[in-house]
Each structure stands twice: as C-alpha cells, then as structure tokens.
Amino acid sequence: MVPQLDSSYWVSQIVWLTICLGILVLFFKKVFLPRITSSVSSRDKHIQELKDKVASLTKLYEKFTQKLTDIDNQRIKETQKIMIETKDRCEKILNEQLKVIDLKSKNAIAEARKDADKLLKNLNETIKAEIDVTTKLVINKLFGDK
C-alpha cells in the first residue's frame, strides 16, 4: 500500500506541515518583510527628496528666468533710450549742417548774382561802346569825314 494514503501517517504529516509553514511564516515575518519594508521606505524617502529637489530647482529656475526677463526688458529700454538720444543728436547735427550749407549756398548765390551783375554791367558798357563805335563808323561811311 502507498504510505501517503495510509491514515496513520496523516497526523504526523499535518504536524510537520504546520511546523514548516510556521517556520516559513516566522522567517518571512522576521527577515524578508522588514527588509522589504525598509527598502520600500528608503525608496519612498529618496523619491520624496528628489521631488523636493525638483520643486526647489523649479522655483530657482523660475526666479532665474524672471531675472533674465527683467534684465532683457531693462536692456531693451536702455537701448531704446540710447537710440532716441542718438537720433536726436543726429537730427541736431544734420540741422546744423543744413543751416551751414544753406548759409553757404545763400552766400554763393549772392556772390554769383554780384558777379552776374558785374558781367551784365560790363556787357552793357561793352555793348554801348561797340554801338558807339559802330554808329561812328556808319556815320563816317554815310557822311564821310566831315
């Protein structure tokens, strides 16, 4: 007969089964479970620390970004101010140069008019003299040397 089916051995098998399962349960409860619990706890603590670091770095990044934006805005304002000042200076210099050029051109025009008037006067005198000479020649030709 097969010993597993003999009912006289069942009691001793149940006792040993109970003892072995009890030892296994105690072993798991005293050795494996505390290790797993501490490992999970350590992991959770590490994850929380990393989350805290990420949060602090995010705040730092936002502050840094805000400071950069402020600096950029300030630089833009300063650049615009410099550009306006430079434009005003250039316009002032240009206006002064235009006044100088206008004055020089007026002086040059006045001198050219004076020269033109002198030339016209000389031309008129020359024409009158030529007319006188031509008239005398014509009269001499017409009337002779009388």
Image (cartoon, helix red, strand yellow):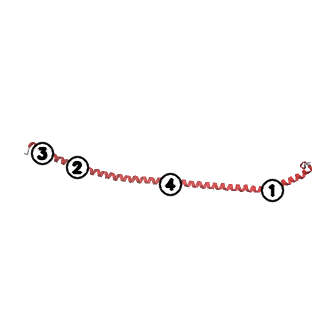
Instruction: Pinpoint residue 46: horizontal percent, then vertical percent.
Output: 69, 56
**Residue at image coords 33%, 52%:** 101
Residue at x 20%, y 49% (from the top left corner): 122
For discs 1 and 2, the disc positioned in front in the rendered view: 1
Q: Quadrant of the C terminus?
A: top left
Q: Amino acid at mark 2?
A: Leu
Disc nearer the start of the sequence (1/2):
1
Pointers 2 and 4 in contact (C-beta within 8 Å): no
Residue position marked by numbered label 4 in the rendering: 75
Closer to us: 79 or 38: 38
Relative placement, left or right, of 68 versus 3 is left
Tell me what residue is drawn at x 48 percent, y 54 percent. Answer: 79
Residue 137: assigned label: 3
What's the amino acid at mark 1? Answer: Phe
Outermost left residue: 146
Residue 35, located in which quarter of the rendered image? bottom right
Question: Separation of disc 2 and disc 4 at Cα?
Answer: 64 Å
Tell me the CA gap for discs 1 and 2.
132 Å
Residue where numbered disc 1 is placed: 27
Earlier residue among tags 2 and 4: 4
Instruction: Give SS at disc 3.
Output: helix
Q: CB under 8 Å between callouts 3 and 2?
A: no
Give the structural element (helix, strand or loop) at label 1: helix
Q: Which residue is mark 2?
A: 119
Q: Local crowd at mark 3 within 10 Å, few (<14), some, or many (≥20)? A: few
> Residue 135 placed where, x, y %?
13, 44
- Residue furthest to the top: 142
Secondary structure beneath disc 2?
helix
